[in-house]
Image: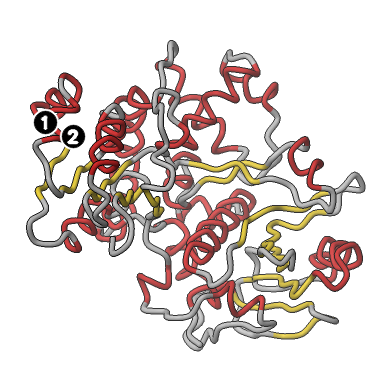
Amino acid sequence: MTDTPVVLVAGPRQAGKTTLVRHIATEGMRYLTLDDELTLLAAKEDPSGLIRSLDRAVIDEIQRAPELLLAIKKTVDEDRRPGRFLLTGSANLMALPNVADSLAGRMETLTLLPLSQSEIRGGTGNWIDYAFGGGFLSAADATTGEHLVEAVLRGGYPQAISRTTARRRTAWARQYVDAILQRDVRDVAEIAKLDLLPRFLRALAQVSGQVCNYSQIGAQVGLDNKTVSRYIGVFEQLYLLRRVDVWARNRLNRVIKTPKLQFIDSGLLSMLCGLSDAAIQRDRCRYGNVVETFVFSELLKHAATAETDCQLLYYRDHAQFEVDFVIENSAGELVAVEVKAAATVKESDLRGLKRLAGLAGDQLRLGVVLYDGVETLPLGERLWAAPLSTLWGRP
């Protein structure tokens, strides 16, 4: 806000955007929320008039009236003072079809995801920065077993964390998803078969962490391939899930190969899958997929604050060698992460990492199996086993 006229804080509903912007908004900034029906009406009927009446302002939930962005562009072009508009959005505005101008050069977008485990527990280090340096954060108070299960099922939404029982957290998560499907979807897309969305989202939850087969998913809910892809795009815009591209030396292959689906929050995914502590004790098979989502969410948050620009990918080849996550920085260096929900690490858990290490050569800075344990141990050249709780450890 000290050097940019417009700042957009984007992210899922209930992640804390409004709380944050109201806390940091400077004196003299007017606060408007488009969740207020009268304000929304004014924004839609006379966007230029509304913006013209504001000198400096916070505008909450801007995706509900994207026509305001053109009016903001006009006023900013006339007065380029930094910090004039602080916006929040519960949808990825740049992907909205009816946003005619991206405010390029005038607006900076920051993504606010649900709380990371480091934020919840007071961790101060960035796991990705340490990994590219060849090391790990300290897991002095390692979280394992049933305590790890609780953290995975809880997720990172502040409202979910504040609830004291699993039953109340599940009730909140169910109402949260219902509200998004019934209201927010209409803000970003015209969807004819709204009644199919809950079933479709539950079907996607069952394949989280897997390569996305549009035909197979569509057949389960009665949708064709194009519609499946479009609906997944809508869920991406609303920060419910994300498509993860494959890592390949040939960058064209990254584009043409099928992405994996990952949900943003393990707590919401657990609710959609009907996964509970009791269900995990009976059968741990599905728990592994949710732990993978939990790690993805943590890595996504570390990537947002890492010193280096980086992207999250995955690795899979024709011989079925796989690595859950490949983090690539702007220099082309790699950190490979395999996720293990168990307390033991087997030789077979290293197959994908070793394959990738042979292919990537000196590009690979570190390969690690994150597991439900307490010891950090070397498993070969640049290969390690480390506790999952290093993700929120301290330097």
Say whether disc 1 or disc 2 marks the residue closer to the N-terminus: 2
The residue shown at (27%, 30%) is 64
Image coordinates of residue 143 in percent, x first then y, are: 49, 76
Decide which of 55, 336 is in the foreground and name it: 55
Type of the residue with mark 2: Leu
- In the picture, measured across the screen, residue 355 lies left or right of residue 305, that is right
Type of the residue with mark 1: Thr
In this view, 387 is above or below 110: below
Image coordinates of residue 319 in percent, x first then y, are: 92, 48
Label 2 element class: loop
Image coordinates of residue 8 in percent, x first then y, are: 33, 48
The residue shown at (81%, 65%) is 353
**What residue is pinned by disc 1?**
39
**What residue is pinned by disc 2?**
34
- In the picture, measured across the screen, residue 370 lies left or right of residue 145, that is right
Disc 1 to disc 2: CB gap under 8 Å: yes
The residue shown at (56%, 30%) is 203
- In the picture, measured across the screen, residue 219 lies left or right of residue 68, that is right
- In the picture, measured across the screen, residue 371 lies left or right of residue 29, that is right
Residue most extreme to the front:
78
Image coordinates of residue 16 in percent, x first then y, are: 27, 55
Label 1 element class: helix
In this view, 253 is above or below 292: above
